[in-house]
Amino acid sequence: MTGGGVDSSVVVVGAGVAGASTVQALRRRGHTGPIVVLGAESTGPYERPPLAKGYLRGDEDASTLASPTSQLEGVAWHLGSSVIGTDLDAQWVMDEHGDRHSFDHLVVATGATPRRLNLPFGTLTLRTVSDANELKARLTPGAQLVVVGGGFLGFEVAATARQLGVEVTVVELSSQPFADRLGARAAGALLALHCAHGVRIEAGTRVIDGERRGDGAVIELANGETLDADVVLESVGAVPDLSWLTSAGLEQESGLLCNQYCEAAPGVWAVGDAARFWHSGYARYVRLEHRTNASEQAAAVAAGILGKRNRYAPVPFVWTDHYDTRIQIAGAIAAVGLGVVDHHDNGAWVETFHQSGDLVGGVAWRAIKEFQSCRRDLLARAREWPDVDPPTS
Amino acid sequence: MKVEIERERCISSGNCVLVSPNVFDQDDHAIVRLHTDTVDEPDVASVEEAVEGCPAAAISIT
Ligand SMILES: Cc1cc2nc3c(=O)[nH]c(=O)nc-3n(C[C@H](O)[C@H](O)[C@H](O)COP(=O)(O)OP(=O)(O)OC[C@H]3O[C@@H](n4cnc5c(N)ncnc54)[C@H](O)[C@@H]3O)c2cc1C
Ligand code: SF4
């Protein structure tokens, strides 16, 4: 197969932020070869985080979501064109129109698709602009929204819906929502914030039955409660859809399995939500569904394509917005136990988590700037991580 | 090297401040602002890293 080269041909499958960032990083690093981007959606790359926040609330319009790609010369964008198959030996992918696109390097940037529970009534999911438009049209003042799945996405929508005057109930399987993502303290604070804003939380239970009623549904929970809903949002996670790659014989385990360089096979790279890569610092495979990861990983993949492979071992960073509160998370949060809290003005605080005396992660509550020093310390720690190789099977 | 920011695009991730604190800062709403728009040699590499790492593509260099 091909080595790295500035004039190699690259096919990127998926025109989300991970795909677009890879293209940008390639050009920025001097890549001059032909690039083809194939995207299932009819729109060019855009930001998804506002779909649950400002865009859904009506503060932002579609033009502010769009990622700037205009300066990218010699890039062929095939939008509204899904890839349906590939032959890695012959080095091509085939799109839904039957056209083949040849490559020296293939970048898998197909993101993830909302998981579905197959409930016996109609539900919405939120991943794309058109999903957001559909949801927004249904979030009228006084409407009853039931959110099935109380993760960041579900609760962000709950907050936005409350701001729009919608009645909201969130149903979550875990009896301690967010505890594994935020630690017990921030998880408790976030749930209290939602309760204070009038969100009803049914935790530690699940939907067992229900039926369609008008445009909405009547929903039965395992704890015996019955909920009336005008709108139901399912937010129970997203899984990569890599069915177009099945013939290629690459390993998938909810995400395309790749090594510490984000390479699934020679010349085949994965980036963004679709990638499950070997994190040489954490010594395990991880899939990071975070906006910042999409850009950082794209830079690593671009370097790899240009023959400058470097281990990709990021300190994960994610933020989530609820009402006027931004929560940031960096590193690895211990699921149980409490960290050390530093209080700042206006109810802001930063909690740091340690393992065997070493800083491993932090959570910031309304403390955007104050979190910088913790993030910097985590990055410094990461420079001392051992480089653990992936297990050979 | 000159650096430019588009504050309306910034999503206040703080990445730029993290990698290049001599050049980037955040205001009270955590939106990016510049200490300086002229970058000298010692900061060039970190500013390039900031451009690449900005999730909102809000930073450009000329
Ligand atoms: C509503 C919402 C809110 C979010 N909020 C936050 C947040 O606050 N903070 C945070 O850190 N992260 C957030 N995220 C996560 C973040 O947006 C994702 O991590 C990021 O979008 C991943 O980018 P990606 O390019 O890997 O995948 P995607 O953005 O999913 O893009 C993949 C693209 O590939 C296309 N595609 C799929 N299959 C094919 C195929 N066979 N052929 C061609 N094209 C294909 C898809 O249609 C899609 O357009 C949020 C996500 C959502 C949905
Ligand atoms: S990296 Fe980009 S989005 Fe983040 S604070 Fe800086 S300019 Fe804003």
Image (cartoon, grey):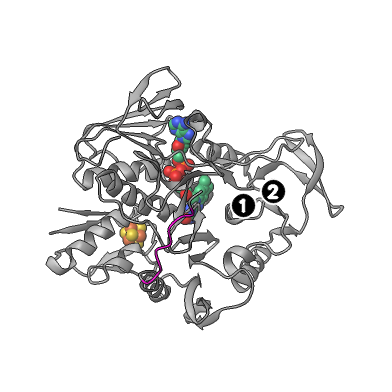
Tell me, yes or no, if residue A80 can be seen here: no
Q: Is residue A390 magenta?
A: yes
Q: Is residue A172 magenta?
A: no
Q: What residue sits 68% from the left and 38% below the top?
A: A123
Frontmost residue, B15 versus A306: A306
Start and end of the magenta stretch? A384-391
Query: Where the N terminus of chain A falls, by quadrant?
Result: top left
Check whether the beta carbons of the residues at disc 2 and disc 1 lie within 8 A of each other.
yes
Q: In this view, which residue lies farthest toward the front?
A: A393
Q: Is mark 2 within 8 Å of ligand 1?
A: no
Amino acid type, residue under disc 2 in the picture: Val
Q: What residue sits 43% from the left and 62% below the top?
A: A388
Rendering quarter of residue A385: bottom left
Chain under disc 2: A
Residue A184: horizontal and vertical position, in percent? Answer: 63, 72
Amino acid type, residue under disc 1 in the picture: Gly
The residue under label 1 is A154
The residue under label 2 is A148
Q: What residue sits 48% from the left and 63% below the top?
A: A282
Tell whether A300 sits left or right of A183: left
